């Protein structure tokens, strides 16, 4: 009937508008039941359950065997990590898989059979699930004693496929790969030519005293390649050239040439290429997001214009204001946007909306929120007004900063004086008394500010919230210190009482005071710019960080599997279960840390072994790390570490630099524009950053795309 | 008289046009004698003498006491360096100073008294000369035994003041300094806050086993600051956190937070800021170069238009073609440009040139040289034509590349097989025979190409010149090898004969073959782009490299003066004169090599001392470096090294990255444009790179500037 048709159209419009808000594709089923399922699937609860499931399955690695999650990492002191019984983590895993199964079925059903075959991500999702389940069954049938667990490497895929931003970023990275591959190829050519040169230059001679360079660094092809690869990371820079340099100074020309060409030119060229390539692709992906938004709104317009109540006589299709209001009330969106749209809808006197008017209404979605601070209280008394003027003035804030600085300096002075004192000689009286005074000042400052600005206005500034929260915590700490240890007096050095010793309490207070000093940031113009850029970057960086987590996780699990049991026992410590921890540590160390690749050289072996034998009592973990590295030399594991270095240190860091350059330059240009304007606005997302350069899609493009919709049949 | 006036005007025009070509300022005296002096001063001979003088005075440091210029750097084998008698280097120095005195007098006279007082560079030049001369007199009066020589630190100034491009670049860098200082300040705040945090976190405890972190890295304020500064360079990344990490894994959060904030965010922010700031300033300086060129041409036009022969009746001022031809014939300029201007002057039928026409004629100067290759010879015989087609075809070049690759692979295989062989077991027969065959092929290839293209056309391609030269050298080497050692045969392993042993000859041939393999570069599209970018960069980079040399030199000399005598004798070697060499080495090592800053930590001291005592026989230089570094810990010399690290590694490298980004992105954009065009053109200078974005100065600006000229009185 017409009424049920109308209901369907309204529901479709609601979903399309929600799609537009979330930048989702509108290519899903549009019948009533599917729409209900679609809204249910994208409801907060469902998405939250999905995120929780992904977190759980990723976190399992920390408790699964072989796990090393203990407080201390020193094998001499720590207890064996808790080893869950067979079946516990496995049943949790099965639960997760079931959730994923539901997820993939709903997703597949919603986009429809035809679209399913085109969607490679969904196919990969199903494949991953099948392989994981098969591996799970194998695992259980071996009573958890199987040696290889493929499904652990596959886990990060679940994180990847759930985020559209990450998929988009991955696509961008993928498009940049050919150019990157060219530079990496160039690096490889550079490396291999110089390796051949080095092998010819530092050949074995008859005089054993003369060929030290050959013995240590260029004994054979793999050694030479490693030496020069490590030189590319600058880790062995002075060491590698010293024997040859001792023989003849001119040999240093070879190494300088290699470093300048490889490190200064080619490596930075990689930065340039990634910046240049990635810039375009990021813009492109943002452009496609905009297209999705406009398409969703246009689709909503089209279905609403097919409502029976519209006069069929109108030449142009149009939408009644009433229907739109009905849709808006039911759609889930930011309440600020909803109100703004409602308001402009009421101000518009017309009864019918054209497509352009409809589109224009929803431009509110693209705008930033401009924050309005609540007004200060208006006092009647003349005295109070004077107080309000004095303590609401910025100078009072500056005074507070000066006091905080004085506090920091006093702590610093005490630290320097107490640096070499024995704990038994220490007297906390001076610092205790000073801090007591300063914390009282902070409390007074907070109260006076609240008096001047009113609580609501005070709390509406993030810097005040930060300030106030820390002041309250400091006050609580100080009061509890006095409650336990009494007021400060000379020789205020009681023994351990309660939860923390007095010394720890004072240290904690000091740390909080140092932390509180960050309140000066918004007062320094350049610092504020830098910090807002960094905060923007963090928001834009989530997809990047996600991909890094995915790669890190996959590498770590592969490492655990590859190097299980390669560590020889040193002394009488068991260390089968130290490996996963080491693996994680190794990856962290190699990430942007050229030194660690230097561990993989033979020359290091000697030093380490002598060092380890001299320090067998202390720093055993340190030694173990070295021993592991020494063992890795003998194996093809080098490839694994070089791959990780290439991906994390070279490619990821360059991508990060590209994003930072992009973000900062936009921000900087905008700052210069903004200085003339008075309004304060913040750009929050990648989409908003590019607002000025984005192109609006044309009506023809939108309509063509709408007519290609697999499930929606437009009347005209 | 009118004739002498006319001569003066012609001479002025010549000089102004030469100024325009060289982007020089036109604000110099313009009377006849001064013009003669000006042309003499900027003649090739004079400028060459000046450059030679600068080179000589800079090179003096290598022979002056304390010098360490010997073949080997190993103190056990080398002879004491040659110590010039007192007065020898000093008299050379005096000669240089006299040349500089002439230089500064001529320069000062030419720009005139009024301008002299405005020119800070000239004032500084005179001041430097006075100080140097005074120091020289002091030096001689002490019979060269004075301990401090200030004039040695001042020497790089002579290099700096002689290059206008370097002065311009320095001005750009200077304008970027405030922004850089902000980030460095931010880094300092970051460092100091984290240092306080670390000192509170890793405080001394009662249990000596528990406070290893405190003992090694955070014992007092300077130690803590150094530990974290070195962590910022990632040199001690795993080491610094190991003791705390052994105690509790959670401590690693502190270090990871510090590294991510400092290293990933703030350091890369510095790159972004320098890129953003420097981009603008480079463009600005290029814009001012363009203005100088247009101004010089306009000035030439104005003086030529005052010639008596011009009809006074003309409303607009204009220049006769004859006068311009006269000027062009006498002016020194690129012959290609001169011919092109002459040609277009003849094609233009008019007798008088307006200002715009005049300016347009000289736009030839801004254009790139488009290289025309001479034609191939035309053969009559049908067979020869076929030959010409076959060997002139690109495929023949590709075949040559494949053969070169095969040669490289064969050398590589032999190298891998011979890697561990004793020199006495080695047999050069196989490699000798193979190389003989390949070199014959290279010769044949060269001859056939010359046959097909003709010698002139063959030589007009740089890749062919490279190829041919190496082939000829290889041929000569091979013939001389056969002449001395006979043809290859099994067991071809004769003893040392002639200049080089057979083994060295074969190695040299192999190295040249590896080097010849670079001929493949122009055939690979992406590689060719990268290489041309790099070559452009090298051209644009001269000013940068010059500034680096200036800073490096000043730092090295300061280092020699500061650390003279700080090295303790180890064993019985004299090492007073090792210091300068060490100083140079140190600076090179610290440049973009974070590891070396790690040397300055106390923790390294222990390792080094044990290592040195174990290896007292070998690697004594290496040990000495370490010992020096250990000694540096105790002194404030740390500041010196941190300053050098900041200037070279942080600021210079970032400037380099900025220039590379700029260059590459321009080039890349142009490549995309060019792919549609067929013409091949190269951009060669910074000026040409920005051609598209430069703004032409308006007529009003030029005339205003001309009327401000201190010596030129224009008639109207």
Image (cartoon, coloured by chain):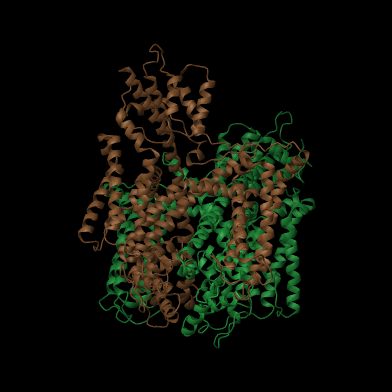
Chain colours: A brown, B green
Would residue A260 be visible to someone looking at this image?
A: yes
Q: Image check: B623 left or right of B166?
A: left
Quarter location, residue A604: bottom left
Vertical relation: B83 (above or below) A27: below
Pick whichever, A292 or A194, lies toward us.
A292
Task: Tell me where residue B80 appears, x and y as whole percent.
Answer: 57, 83
Quarter location, residue B408: bottom left
Would residue A192 be visible to someone looking at this image?
A: no
Quarter location, residue A82: bottom left
Q: Residue at x 43, y 43 (%)?
A: A281
Query: Which quadrant would the N terminus of chain B be assigned to in this image?
Result: top right
Pick whichever, B232 or A585, lies toward us.
A585
Q: Image check: B574 left or right of B141?
A: left
Task: Tell me where residue A547 appears, x and y as whole percent.
Answer: 40, 51
Vertical relation: B262 (above or below) A679: below
Query: Which quadrant would the C terminus of chain B be assigned to in this image?
Result: top right
Task: Tell me where residue B477 appears, x and y as whole percent.
Answer: 38, 70
Task: Tell me where residue B484 appears, x and y as whole percent.
Answer: 35, 77
């Amino acid at each position: 009937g017409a009424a049920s048709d109308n209901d369907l159209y309204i529901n479709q419009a609601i979903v399309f508008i929600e799609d537009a808000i979330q930048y989702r594709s509108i290519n899903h089923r549009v019948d009533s039941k599917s729409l209900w399922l679609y809204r249910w699937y994208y409801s907060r609860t469902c998405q939250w359950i999905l995120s929780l499931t992904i977190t759980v399955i990723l976190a399992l690695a920390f408790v699964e065997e072989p796990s090393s999650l203990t407080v201390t990492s020193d094998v001499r002191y720590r207890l064996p990590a808790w080893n869950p019984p067979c079946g516990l983590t496995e049943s949790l895993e099965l639960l997760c898989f079931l959730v994923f199964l539901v997820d993939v079925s709903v997703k597949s059903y919603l986009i429809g059979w035809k679209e399913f075959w085109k969607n490679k991500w969904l196919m990969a999702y199903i494949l991953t699930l099948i392989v994981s389940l098969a591996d799970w069954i194998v695992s259980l049938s071996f009573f958890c004693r199987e040696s290889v667990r493929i499904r652990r490497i596959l886990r990060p895929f679940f994180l990847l496929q759930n985020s559209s931003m990450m998929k988009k970023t991955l696509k961008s990275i993928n498009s940049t790969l050919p150019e990157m591959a060219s530079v990496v190829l160039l690096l490889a050519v550079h490396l291999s030519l110089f390796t051949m040169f080095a092998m010819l230059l530092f050949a074995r001679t008859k005089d054993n005293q003369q060929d030290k360079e050959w013995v240590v660094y260029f004994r054979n092809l793999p050694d030479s390649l490693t030496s020069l690869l490590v030189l590319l990371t600058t880790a062995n820079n002075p060491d590698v050239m010293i024997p040859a340099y001792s023989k003849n100074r001119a040999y240093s020309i070879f190494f300088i040439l290699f470093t300048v060409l490889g490190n200064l030119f080619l490596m930075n060229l990689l930065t340039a290429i990634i910046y240049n390539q990635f810039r375009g692709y990021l813009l492109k992906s943002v452009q496609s997001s905009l297209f999705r938004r406009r398409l969703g709104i246009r689709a909503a317009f089209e279905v609403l214009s097919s409502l029976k109540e519209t006069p069929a006589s109108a030449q142009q299709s149009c939408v009644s204001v009433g229907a739109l209001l009905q849709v808006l009330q039911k759609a889930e969106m930011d309440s600020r946007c909803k109100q703004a749209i409602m308001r402009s809808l009421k101000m518009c006197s017309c009864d019918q909306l054209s497509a352009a008017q409809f589109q224009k209404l929803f431009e509110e979605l693209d705008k930033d929120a401009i924050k309005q601070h609540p007004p200060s209280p208006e006092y009647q008394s003349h005295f109070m007004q004077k107080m309000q003027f004095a303590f609401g003035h910025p100078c009072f804030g500056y005074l507070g900063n000066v006091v905080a600085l004085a506090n920091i300096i006093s702590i610093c002075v005490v630290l320097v004086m107490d640096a070499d004192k024995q704990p038994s000689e220490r007297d906390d009286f001076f610092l205790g008394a000073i801090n007591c005074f300063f914390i009282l000042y902070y409390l007074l400052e907070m109260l006076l500010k609240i008096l001047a600005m009113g609580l609501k206005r005070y709390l509406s500034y993030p810097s005040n919230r930060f300030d106030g929260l820390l002041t309250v915590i400091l006050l609580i700490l100080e009061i509890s210190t006095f409650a336990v240890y009494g007021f400060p007096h000379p020789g205020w050095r009681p023994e351990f009482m309660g939860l923390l010793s007095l010394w720890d309490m004072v240290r904690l207070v000091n740390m909080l005071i140092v932390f509180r000093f960050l309140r000066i940031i918004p007062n320094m113009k350049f610092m504020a710019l830098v910090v807002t850029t960094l905060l923007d970057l963090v928001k834009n960086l989530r997809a990047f960080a996600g991909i890094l987590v995915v790669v890190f996780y996959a590498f770590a699990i592969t490492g655990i599997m590859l190097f299980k049991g390669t560590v020889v026992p040193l002394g009488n410590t068991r260390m089968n279960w130290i490996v996963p921890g080491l693996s994680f540590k190794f990856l962290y160390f190699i990430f942007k840390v050229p030194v660690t690749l230097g561990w993989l050289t033979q020359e290091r072996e000697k030093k380490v072994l002598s060092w380890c034998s001299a320090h067998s009592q202390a720093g055993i973990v340190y030694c173990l790390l070295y021993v592991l590295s020494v063992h890795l030399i003998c194996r093809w594991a080098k490839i694994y570490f070089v791959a990780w270095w290439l991906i994390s240190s070279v490619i990821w860091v360059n991508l990060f630099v590209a994003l930072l350059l992009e973000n900062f330059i936009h921000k900087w240009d905008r700052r210069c524009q903004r200085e003339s304007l008075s309004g304060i606005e913040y750009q929050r997302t990648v989409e908003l950053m590019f607002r000025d350069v984005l192109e609006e899609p044309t009506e023809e493009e939108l309509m063509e795309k709408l007519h290609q919709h697999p499930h929606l049949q437009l009347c005209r």
